[in-house]
Image (cartoon, rainbow, N blue to C red):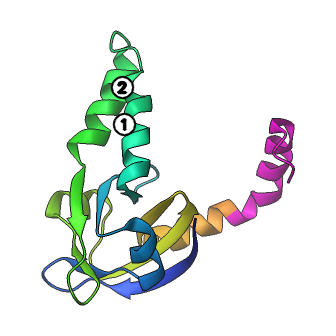
Amino acid sequence: MFMGEHQHSIDPKGRLFIPARFREGLGNRFVLTKGLDGCLFAYPLPEWEALEQKLKSLPFTRGDARAFVRFFFSGAVECEADKQGRILIPLNLREYARLEKEAVIIGVSSRVEIWAKDQWEHYKGQAASSYEEIAEKIVDLNLGI
């Protein structure tokens, strides 16, 4: 399980240090792709394969399903950390997530998310203001929170 928040710089070559605890959970090779809300998602290969199977089951006759699957898979790349614990984030993914110099890496249960620092601060500020309201809505899902 991934949890926590870490801030790191992106070097001029587009490399980002991934914290050791996250690297251990992601494994030697993992998948990085376009996420939701303007961030990147990183999945361990077994988690990615399970997600891939679920997405394959979406009806290809639905335009919204096709669009999502195209977008999600077209941005996916397999990554491997170097000896210093850095990954190279391809330019198209850096542009998508607006990653320039400062990044925030967060653990979100079964995946890791990579955010541009300013985007994360903005998102976190908005989410914090509605945290209790969201909790009230999801209590109906019987999550035991």
Residue 142: horizontal and vertical position, in percent?
85, 39
In the rendered structure, which amino acid carries the disc numbered 1? Glu
Quarter in which the N terminus is drawn: bottom right
Mark 2 element type: helix
Q: Helix or strand or loop: what does disc 1 sit on? A: helix
User: Does the segment drawn in magenta span residue 10?
Assistant: no
Q: Amino acid at mark 2?
A: Lys
Provide the residue designation for mark 1: 52
Q: Which residues are magenta?
A: 128-145
Left or right: residue 127 compared with residue 136: left
Q: Is residue 136 magenta?
A: yes
Q: Residue at x 48, y 80 (%)?
A: 21
Quadrant that contains the C terminus: bottom right
Give percent across and percent down for residue 100.
26, 76
Answer yes or no: do the residues labelled 1 and 2 have beta carbons within 8 Å?
Answer: yes
Residue at 34% x, 9% y: name it: 61
Give neighbour class at mark 1: few <14, some 14-19, many 20+ (Cα, 10 Å). Answer: few
- Nearest the camera: 49 or 77? 49
Q: Could you classify mark 2 by the number of other residues whose Cα lies within 10 Å: few (under 14), some (14-19), or many (20 or more)?
A: few
Residue 79 falls in which quadrant of the image?
Answer: bottom left
Percent of width and height locating residue 87: 24, 75
